[in-house]
Image (tube, grey):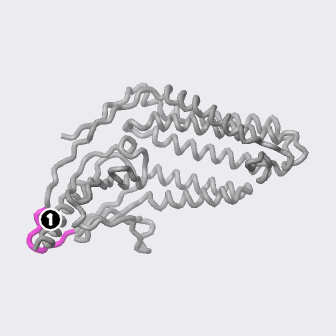
Amino acid sequence: MKSSPHPAPRSTGRLWPLIAAVPFLAALAATVVVYVSVSARLPDPLATHFGADGRADGFTSPQGFLTGCLAGLLVLGIGFGLPAGLREPSAGTPWLIAGGFATAAALGYLICLTLLGNAGAPDGAAVRLPMWQMAVALGLALPAGALGRLLAGPAPRPTEQAEGEAPRLDLPGATAAGWSRTISSPPLVALGVLVCGGGLVSILGGEVLTGVMLLLTGAVAVAVTSVRVTVDRRGLTLAPTLLSAFRIRFRRIAPDRVAEATSRRIDVFAEFGGWGYRVRPERSGLVLRSGDGLVLRLTGGRRFMVTVDDAATAAALLNTYADRARTRQGG
């Protein structure tokens, strides 16, 4: 039988999305309040980046800086908040919330410090920001993270998921068959689009390098949001649906590399710590949601997992082809 994690207390789990949003809302509010209070005394352009010696080496307009900061905080808030809003609790969610608190505290402090440091300066080049302020930001992040973890409450205790049997499909002789399903992640689509939007806003605000990095990150996120999973005589193939015209694939595992294929429920955050293509010491996988999944035990001892519907059928077909591959090698 399959086992499942102990559920988190309902009163705490229901509040996780709200708790995750609180630090970013606070950072957004602090940024707006400080900007409004000092906007009349800000140089244009203002200093927004500083070297190791504390001297300003990057500048942008006050409006561009405000827009970029608000967009960045919003994107990060959604990125930390989406997993906390999942219907099924995960052991990793309270720690994700703690990371959100730490991130929001550090960024909020540095944003407000930058605005206050520019206030009253004759021009941006005269502004200084000593590097010890980074230690202060870290010092604020640690207790903020601890507060977030405390507010999140107890985490569900994951138990080892029991894997199902390793079935076979009855394919007479050399009969061939194929199986295919598409998996997608709407939250990752939304996150990728928001990150791309943040990149465009940053570029328009003068932060070209930051904007380009955000655009590339968002584009990669969108590219992996829909994947075609196929099992046939060539083994297991994972290919991005949006790039199918270019015949690009993420990974292919030949039948002779599969020792056994089974299916079970996969908890993304408890087992991998997040969505996407994940690599861990003894396992890796493409996991876009929690739920039914295909588990391959490879000949080298590692496991590869894919969250996909009708995983039992895929496992049975893959075991059949793996048996054929071993028979050919033995004969």
Residue 308 coordinates in the image, percent (x, y): 31, 54
Magenta run includes residue 255: no
Residue 78 coordinates in the image, percent (x, y): 54, 44
Q: Farthest front residue? A: 53
Near-viewer residue (50 or 112) = 50
Residue 103 coordinates in the image, percent (x, y): 59, 39
Magenta run includes residue 171: yes
Residue 219 coordinates in the image, percent (x, y): 53, 61
Residue at (29% x, 53% y) in the render:
303
Q: Secondary structure at mark 1?
A: helix
Would residue 27 be found to the left or right of residue 38 on screen?
A: left
Task: Pick the quarter of the image with the N terminus.
Answer: top left
Residue at (45% x, 33% y) in the render:
94
Would residue 136 be found to the left or right of residue 35 on screen?
A: left
Residue at (44% x, 59% y) in the render:
224
Res 193 seen here: yes
Res 49 seen here: no
Task: Name which residue type carries label 1.
Answer: Asp
Near-viewer residue (295 or 289) = 295
Which residue is labeled 1 in the image? Answer: 323
Would residue 287 be found to the left or right of residue 292 on screen?
A: right
- In the image, which residues are magenta? 169-177
Q: Which secondary structure class fits the magenta region best?
A: loop
Would residue 309 be found to the left or right of residue 70 on screen?
A: left
* Mark 1 crowdedness (10 Å alpha carbons): few <14, some 14-19, many ≥20: some
Residue at (57% x, 61% y) in the render:
216
Task: Pick the quarter of the image with the C terminus.
Answer: bottom left
